[in-house]
Amino acid sequence: MKKVILVTIIALTMSLHSYAQFTIGPKAGLNLSTVHSTKVDDYADYKTGLNAGFFGKYSINNSFDLQVELLYAQLGYKDNMPTFDYDGSGFENFNYKLIAHNLDVPLLVKYNLLGRPWIFFEGGVQLGFSLSNKYSCNDKDVERAMNELKPEFNTFDFQLLGGLGFYLGSGFSVNARYCHGLTDMMDSGLHMRNRAFQFSLAYNLWQF
């Protein structure tokens, strides 16, 4: 019995090593990001931004891959702030946005539908590290005040990921991904958390 188990383990190990391969390449695309507060039943407007970086993929077999990425991502949101004069006689609506720069590390499991390179589903987690955050407003005085009085931003963000993609051939693939933040992005008491849709194009540059 022990010999049978040993032979089975050796056979599985050899089959995995005979198939397994690594793929490395660049990827880039577009983010649509916003924030959601668990204290306020409302979403801010979506803001567009870029994402770019590299991925490394380990193919276990025809159906499953493990993938890690290192991405620069532009996140944030857009909103407006109605402001009244001290006597209540005047009113102005200031449009502003938060421009956030992040370094993200997605850790993913990918499933290739029917074991073929055409459609894949992916899921996993993302470790996000804040690089900088800055407010931009159509009124420069308000912008200056917002940046001077802004709360302390957290430097780490943990997110859940899910998405799908398509292999285009010649080493190219596209994917759409939803990112759901689980940690507060700032110490404001509003429990504001990142939400984003990510669209990207990837290319298999090296395979070995």
Image: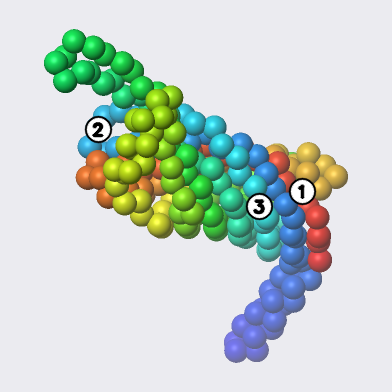
Quarter of image, res 58: bottom right
Q: Residues within 10 Å of mark 3 (few under 14, many from 20)?
A: some
User: Who is closer to the viewer here, 81 or 201?
Assistant: 81
Compute the Cα span from label 3 to label 1: 11 Å
Tell me what residue is drawn at x 74 percent, y 59 percent.
Answer: 24
Query: For residue 165, what is the image quadrant?
Result: top right
Which residue shows up at 67% across the image and 56% down it? 55
Question: Judging from the image, what secondary structure is the residue with disc 3 in?
Answer: strand
The residue to which callout 2 is attached is 40
Amino acid type of the residue tagged 2 in the rendering: Val
Q: Nearer the viewer, residue 37 or 3?
A: 37
Question: Tag 2 or tag 3, which sits nearer the N-term?
Answer: 2
Marks 1, 2: nearer the viewer: 2
Image vertical order of residue 37 relative to residue 105, above or below: above
Q: Secondary structure at mark 1?
A: strand
| CA gap, disc 3 and disc 2 | 34 Å
Is there CB contact under 8 Å for labels 3 and 2? no
- Where is residue 72 shown, x and y percent of the image? 59, 50
Residue 17 visible at all: yes
Quadrant containing the C terminus in the rendered view: bottom right
Q: Residue shown at 67%/78% (left/top)?
A: 8
The quadrant of the rendering that contains the N terminus is bottom right
The numbered disc on residue 203 is 1
The 10 Å Cα crowd at callout 2, few under 14, some 14 to 19, many 20 or more, is few
Q: Considering only order in the chain, which callout, 1 or 3, is on the residue closer to the N terminus?
A: 3
Identify residue for label 3.
Answer: 53
- Circle 3 or circle 1, nearest the eye: 3
Amino acid type assigned to the residue bearing label 1 in the image: Tyr
Q: Which badge, 1 or 2, comes first in the chain's sequence? A: 2
Badge 2 element: loop
Q: Tell whether 37 sits left or right of 140.
A: left
- Relative height, residue 119 to residue 48 (above, below): below
